[in-house]
Amino acid sequence: MSSVEVRRLVKVYGDVVALNGIDLSISKGRLFALIGPNGAGKTTLLRIIAGLNKPTSGEVWINGVLVASLEAGVFIPPAKRGVGVVFQNLGLYPHMTVYDNVALPLRVRHVPRLEVDRSVRLIAEELEISDLLSRYPTQLSSGQQQRVAIARALVGNPSILLMDEPFSNLDARYRPTARELIRSIQRRLGITVIIASNDPLDIVNLVDETAVIIKGRVAQVGEPVSLYREPASLEVAGLMGELNVIEAVITNPLSREAREVYLGVRPGDLTIASGDSGLKDYVEIGTGVVEAVEFQGNYNLVLVNVNGRILKMATNLTPTAGSRVTIAARRSGIMLFSKANGRLIKVNDGDVLVSVKP
């Protein structure tokens, strides 16, 4: 059964179409991500699911119950949807203690005082913030503030947790800890968690499934690794990670019919050709000059100028800046996209010949 389902969802703000016919089904107990560029409609979709905005048209279903439909005259308010929300800016009240911030959703619903106290202390223990309850948000680190915001979202025991850009305001050093926190919460509580993000690094090793949102539409849905390796389009490929794009030509050996395409290859699928037999699974794509070698910790990012195009290569090799090298791409990592519409072309290496345009 779906935890959240949206059907033909449209949201219009004046002349701006924020959501343009979204269809999406998210199973119960899943860690799900919405990924897309800024302005794609991710936050709007979260707010409509939470009941903070009404859709222009279409339907929202939560746990099998219709909660929003203009056509059917249905709109269930946020407090009755069983949904918790963690906003991008966290939304903590600086004049209130951590205890009062966490307790606020229950007090708004006029929950008895003793039950409020019990619920706050239970979720505080779960999030390991019991020792922070008497402090104010300004006295906390960014990581502690996020834990407080999550506690406030979970104190009402929701079945769904929505998180808008939960990693964007965190120090890079804390992001792995935050990802593990979200994963452990989801596993312990068994709830559905939906995360909106514009950074694939935030979600690729965290979530079970991802929907790519582009210009208010669902461009592709699947496991993060599948979207990374087999993106439906050039645009999806770029959103899911760093991509080198090169103009190329594919030719059918039987008909000799040629077709211009874009060749996409990830930095990790490039290497320097040196005539080694170990490169039999690679194809040469050009010769150029090493512009820079940037140490990244466990690999080097090598920038190579090939016919005026800068190709990025992630490698353990350390070529000398200014040296001339031949770049080769791993065959299994090559993605070919239509030059006409940017869609991925499914090809068999044995069926076509690929040549890079100079």
Image (cartoon, rainbow, N blue to C red):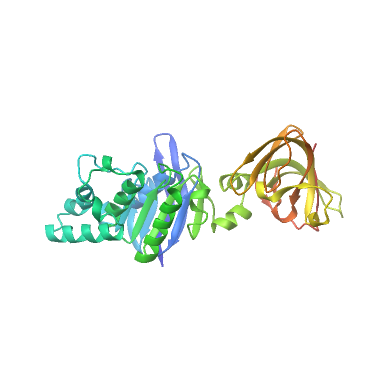
Q: Residue at x 39, y 34 (%)?
A: 14
The quadrant holding residue 112 is bottom left
- Farthest residue to the left: give it: 113
Q: Is residue 336 left or right of residue 354?
A: left
Q: Residue at x 32, y 52 (%)?
A: 150
Picture coordinates of residue 278, whole percent (x, y): 79, 57
Along the viewing direction, whichever of 233 and 126 lies nearer the viewer: 126
Along the viewing direction, whichever of 19 and 276 lies nearer the viewer: 276
Is residue 272 in view?
yes
- Farthest residue to the bottom: give it: 1
Relative height, residue 149 to residue 4 (above, below): above
Picture coordinates of residue 130, whole percent (x, y): 24, 55
Q: Is residue 307 left or right of residue 127?
A: right
Q: Is residue 62 left or right of residue 329?
A: left
Picture coordinates of residue 287, whole percent (x, y): 80, 39
Picture coordinates of residue 137, whole percent (x, y): 26, 43
Q: In which quadrant of the rendered image does the C terminus lie?
A: top right
Q: Residue at x 20, y 39 (%)?
A: 95
Is residue 230 in view?
no
Q: In which quadrant of the rendered image does the N terminus lie?
A: bottom left
Numbered circles on residues, count: 0
Along the viewing direction, whichever of 49 and 248 lies nearer the viewer: 248
